[in-house]
């Protein structure tokens, strides 16, 4: 057999072997077996030197052609395998479009959010605009400007969290009520009349129990103008009670004390469960205590930029959690911020 015949045989064998290759590792084996340094083609080419000199160029050229052809076939096989692998992948990833879709978990509103939205809507109908005020306040805004002097005993009822500040810096606190927003709103609008609703989170240095949390929501409403009387306060509360708790809901004011209003009153509504007849929710009194209110104290008006000789106003506040507790019969305020889905899923 001549070397050319041997070469043709070898080339044909290699091409047949290549056609049967199924994966990358077989391909690597084939490459080293045929084209590698110890491969069949290389081994045969080493015998070139044994040929008569005049035959060498022709046979050498045949070797080159054979090597080129096999290299070409190798790269085609690589492509073929890659393509096959990609097809397998696509086959495996196939989506069955006839399967029913996965249901998306639908979120619900938190009970505090439900009440907040109702209250905002109610006050918007009466011409109040929502005013956003910071949760982090200075002592001055949270207490002093609202007529709580540093040694005022009312501060004990509203103790909060203090931020450690460098000496000489203003005292910074988490607001204990939404009332500092009154000062911000008045200072923004004075001497124009103002009618705002201030919703937001408040903080108290409280022992956390079924009845009290260290964080809760509150609403503040404030109206300042030239002819505002306590009759306007009562009328606004009647409007609020009817819209929030239904027609026929009565409002009762009981004398009380707050540093930033004078006169001040506790705000009760007739029990919406028993319509005033007496039940477990209202502790058989027929009334539910929901907040506090009063006429803006002249000192607070002045701190807000209004002359109390010319201007007057009313303000009040209550908590959405307290209302939700009554409306939904919730037995423990700690549920509100427990992040427990079993609790949250009950409201809509
Ligand atoms: Zn009742």
Image: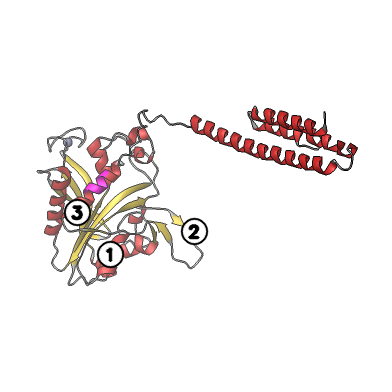
Residue 185 numbered tag? 1
Answer left or right for 122 relative to 200: left
Give the mark, 2 or 1, whose residue is nearer the N terminus: 2
Answer left or right for 243 relative to 173: left
Say if residue 39 shows up in the picture. Answer: no
Q: Are marks 2 and 3 in contact (CB under 8 Å)?
A: no
Nearest the viewer among 266 and 272 is 272
Q: Are marks 2 and 1 in contact (CB under 8 Å)?
A: no
Q: Residues within 10 Å of mark 1 (few under 14, many from 20)?
A: many
Q: Residues within 10 Å of mark 3 (few under 14, many from 20)?
A: many
Q: Closer to us: mark 2 or mark 3? A: 3
Magenta span main SS: helix
The residue singled out by tag 2 in the image is: 164
Q: Secondary structure at mark 3?
A: helix
**Cα separation between marks 1 and 3:** 16 Å
* Magenta region: 114-118
The residue singled out by tag 3 in the image is: 123
Q: Provide residue 145's location: percent of width, then percent of height.
A: 32, 65
Please name the residue shown 37% across and 47% down the image.
215
Q: Secondary structure at mark 2?
A: loop
Say if residue 135 shows up in the picture. Answer: yes
Residue 111 numbered tag? none
Q: Residues within 10 Å of mark 2 (few under 14, many from 20)?
A: few
Answer yes or no: disc 2 within 8 Å of ligand 1. no
Q: Secondary structure at mark 1?
A: helix
Please name the residue shown 13% across and 59% down the image.
232
Q: Quadrant of the N terminus?
A: top right
Give the mark, 2 or 3, whose residue is nearer the N terminus: 3
Q: Provide residue 45's location: percent of width, then percent of height.
A: 83, 37
């Amino acid at each position: 057999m001549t070397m050319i015949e041997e070469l043709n045989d070898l080339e044909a064998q290699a091409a047949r072997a290549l056609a049967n290759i199924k994966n990358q590792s077989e391909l690597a084996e084939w490459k080293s077996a045929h084209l590698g340094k110890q491969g069949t083609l290389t081994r045969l080419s080493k015998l070139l030197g044994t040929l008569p000199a005049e035959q060498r160029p022709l046979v050498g050229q045949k070797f080159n052609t054979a090597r080129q052809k096999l290299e070409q076939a190798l790269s085609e096989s690589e492509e073929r395998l890659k393509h096959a692998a990609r097809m397998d992948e696509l086959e495996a990833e196939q989506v069955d479009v006839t399967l029913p879709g996965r249901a998306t978990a639908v979120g619900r509103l938190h009970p505090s959010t439900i009440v907040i939205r109702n209250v905002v809507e109610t006050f918007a109908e009466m011409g109040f605009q929502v005013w956003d005020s910071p949760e982090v306040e200075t002592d001055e805004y949270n207490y002093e400007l609202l007529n709580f002097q540093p040694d005022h005993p009312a501060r004990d009822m509203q103790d909060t969290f203090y931020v450690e500040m460098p000496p000489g810096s203003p005292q910074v606190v988490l607001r204990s009520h939404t009332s500092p927003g009154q000062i911000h709103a008045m200072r923004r609008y004075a001497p124009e009349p103002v009618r705002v609703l201030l919703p937001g989170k408040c903080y108290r240095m409280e022992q956390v129990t079924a009845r009290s949390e260290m964080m809760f929501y509150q609403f503040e409403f404030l109206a300042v103008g030239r002819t505002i009387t306590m009759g306007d306060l009562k009328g606004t509360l009647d409007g609020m009670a009817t819209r929030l708790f239904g027609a026929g809901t009565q409002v009762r004011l009981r004398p009380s004390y707050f540093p930033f209003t004078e006169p001040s009153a506790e705000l009760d509504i007739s029990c919406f469960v028993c319509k005033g007849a007496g039940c477990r929710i209202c502790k058989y009194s027929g009334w539910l205590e929901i907040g506090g209110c009063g006429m803006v104290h002249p000192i607070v008006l002045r701190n807000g930029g209004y002359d109390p000789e010319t201007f007057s106003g009313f303000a009040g506040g209550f908590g959405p959690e307290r209302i939700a507790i009554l409306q939904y019969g919730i037995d423990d305020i700690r549920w509100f911020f427990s992040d427990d889905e079993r609790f949250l899923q009950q409201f809509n």
